[in-house]
Every structure is written in structure tokens, then in C-alpha cells.
Image (cartoon, rainbow, N blue to C red):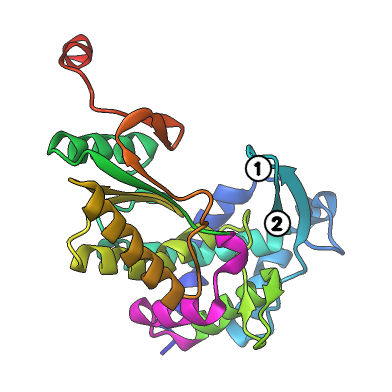
Amino acid sequence: MNALLDSMVDPENVQKAWRRVRRDRAPWSPEVNREHLDQALPRHLLRLVQDLQTGRYRPGAMRQFAVAKGDGGRRVISAQYLRDKLAQRMAHQVLEPRVEPFLHPDSFGYRPGRGVPHALHRVRERIATGLDWVVDADIRSFFDQVPHRGVRRELKRFVRDRGLRRLIDRWLVAGSHSASLAGSRRGVPQGAVLSPLLCNIFLDRLDRSLADAGIPFVRYADDFLLLAATRTDAERARSHVDRCLRRMGLELHPDKTRVSRVSPRVRFLGEPVVRRSRATRKRRQ
């Protein structure tokens, strides 16, 4: 039942992950700085692998700092020690290929071969079919409010390996921001290597609900648009996603979620949501 964990600590996977993170100048751990790591790298890598294999591995406390948001608020960013970044990169490399084929095609954030241009192109494709109304949706405090119970439930759809699931649970607990009154832990740390993939796994439930209801959408991480032909359809779509998110332990931000006609005032991923003119298309051909 630990095949994925075995693949995670395979020497080839370890070396591939190390090549991805080795330029990061973060300290290896609270006790080991980069100078000491460079002097005894093989020993530290071997110790990490052994700790993962035997279950002794425990993630270090995450260093957290606040950065300003565009709306005047502040966002907490978490910084991992290099030891934990490497371990999460090792996990990411075995988990992503297993999950990726099953994610919805209208999800574009933090996925290989996809990005902002692809998401915007998909929005324009949708608008070109006559979908002139959009719901610009905002999930209230998404990263801080993701319930760990929901992540665990969705993760089981993709991962039967109990060892890897226990490991991911330790990372969730180490990076959690809060607990509800009922005691359930919440929060996925922004800045952690595995967080974007875990969020896509969790929000795949929302994607499937929208697809099953026949609601066109484009999602980039926690930022998404619902598209509709009429205002009535758009309002229904908003109500559907609100109910779905509440069942998932989240909620729409009432002041930042808007229903409107397609216009330059509506922006998605920093770009205006407009129907591209024929003249613009000809210039780009």
C-alpha cells in the first residue's frame, strides 16, 4: 500500500527533485544552514530519505510573513526550510502524474502545459459562443479556510497509498492557519511546494459539480469565472456555486463576487473580459 511513497524516495526521483530546489538559498533546517549543508550534502539527503522511509520524518515549523494585497489587505506567505521543500518536491513529482489526467480541462492554474494565456483563451472561446454574462467569483480567504477534512477526502480518490497520505496530512497540520470552533483544522500554506496541487485536488469537486450542472466555467486556482447566456442563468450559476462551496466548508465573498455583462470593466487574471474584435484578430494573425 506504499508504492507511491517508495517511488517518492527512489534515488532518481530524489536527484530530480534536488535539481529543482538546489538553487534555493533557504537553510536546510533550523539547525543546518546552507554552508553546513553543502559540506555534507549526501549525508543530509540520505538522512531525509531514511526518515521518510521509516516514518520518523516530521516537517519543520514554517516561517511566515505578511505581504500586502492589491485590495489593501495582507496575505500570509509561508516559507519552508529546504529539507521540507525537497521532500514536498519529491512527493509532487510522483503525485502530479497520477492526478493530472483526471482534473477538469477548464482548470488552468498550476498545471503542466497550462497557464494564464490558456485560461484567457478559453474565456474568449466561451464568450464567442454567445455567453454574454459572467459571474466573477471570489472565495473568501480561500487558502486560510480550506478544511483539511475535505482535502483528505478528495485525496483518497487519487491516492490509496496510506504512507503518502499520512505524510501529506503532517504537512497540512504543520502549515495550518486556524481551527474552527468544532476543532477541525483549516488552511493550506501559500508558498509551500505542494499547496497548489492540493488545492486543485480539493477544488476538483467544485469543477465536477459545475460540469454536471452544465455551467460553463474557467478556473485558475481559486480564481474563476462562470459564464452564462442571460442574467437569470448567471444568477442561477452563482446560487449553485454558493451552495456547493458551503458544502465544501467554504463560501463566496459577498462583496467581491459580481454578476455582470461582459465588458472591459470585468477583469480575469488581470485582463479585461471582452469579446475580441475582428480587427484585433486580423492584426494577430
Q: Is residue 47 visible in this depiction of the protein? A: no
Question: What crowding class fits label 2: few (fewer than 14 Cα within 10 Å), some (14-19), or many (20 or more)?
Answer: some
Residue located beneath label 2 in the image: 78
Stretch in magenta:
141-162
Question: What crowding class fits label 1: few (fewer than 14 Cα within 10 Å), some (14-19), or many (20 or more)?
Answer: few
Q: Secondary structure at mark 1?
A: loop
Number of numbered discs present? 2
Rendered image quadrant of residue 275: top left
Residue at the far front: name it.
Answer: 232
Residue located beneath label 1 in the image: 23
Rendered image quadrant of residue 100: bottom left
Residue at the far left: name it.
Answer: 129
Q: Secondary structure at mark 2?
A: strand
Q: Nearer the viewer, residue 62 or 246?
A: 246
| Residue 106 disc label | none
Quarter of the figure that contains the C terminus: top left
Quarter of the figure that contains the N terminus: bottom left
Which numbered disc, 1 or 2, marks the residue closer to the eye? Answer: 2
Earlier-in-chain disc, 1 versus 2: 1
Was residue 156 drawn as part of the magenta stretch in this picture? yes
Q: Is residue 153 above or below residue 7?
A: below
| Percent position of residue 65, x then y | 78, 51
Q: Is residue 257 above or below residue 156?
A: above
Tell me the amino acid under the disc marked 2: Ser
| Percent position of residue 99, x then y | 34, 67
Residue at the far right: name it.
Answer: 31
Q: Nearer the viewer, residue 85 or 139?
A: 139
| Percent position of residue 76, x then y | 71, 54
172 on left or right of 177:
left
Would you say the magenta stretch is mainly helix, strand or loop?
helix
